[in-house]
Amino acid sequence: MSVHRRIQGTWIRLDSNEHDDASAHAGEEPEDLEALAQESASAMPVRRAFLFCSMLGFSIYALLGLDDADNKDFVVTLAPGEYVRMLRTGAQLTPTELDQAIGHDIGFIESVEAGDVDLVEYPVQLALDIARSTRSSACRLLKVLEQATWRS
């Protein structure tokens, strides 16, 4: 069963103040979870997104509409920082060029590559941006981050 079919028809009420009286929202329409699923997963930190999908019993790859066939024979042997360095150098980008491409401050990618920044604590969208900017597989980068999530 597809991810979207599993969450189809699930509605939630999004509210920034959890302590509000429910009667205050009586006339408001709830939000369709299916319509928000991909956007929510992209905005979640990687660690939380994998746990969220695991709890709900579906693949983050399917939720994001990624073809994870690319992962079938892929064996993770590098830490996230090392993998990002490999992607960056393969795309012939300097750390500064990749920083600019993903919209981060200068030095961010150097910190990632040095292992000072843990990408699993950053939104999934950052991993997607790194993959897009280096013209590499988002599935494989997410697989590296998935392995790092379960190790830590």
Image (cartoon, grey):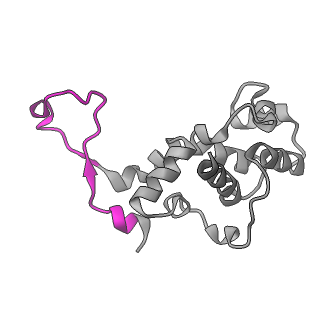
Q: Is residue 122 visible?
A: no
Q: Is residue 102 shown above or below 127?
A: above
Which quadrant is the C terminus positioned in? top right
Q: Quadrant of residue 122?
A: top right
Residue at 35 percent across and 66 percent down: it is 6
Task: Locate residue 145 relative to residue 83 in the image: left or right.
Answer: left
- Indicate the position of residue 63 as horizontal and vertical percent values: 49, 60
Q: Quadrant of residue 30?
A: top left
Farthest residue, direction front: 151
- Indicate the position of residue 68 as horizontal and vertical percent values: 62, 67
- Indicate the position of residue 124 as horizontal and vertical percent values: 58, 45
Q: Is residue 46 visible?
A: yes
Numbered label tally: 0
Towards the viewer: 118 or 43: 118
Which segment did they paint magenta? 4-31
Task: Locate residue 2 relative to residue 31 in the image: left or right.
Answer: right
- Indicate the position of residue 35 as horizontal and vertical percent values: 37, 53
Residue at 66 percent across and 60 percent down: it is 139
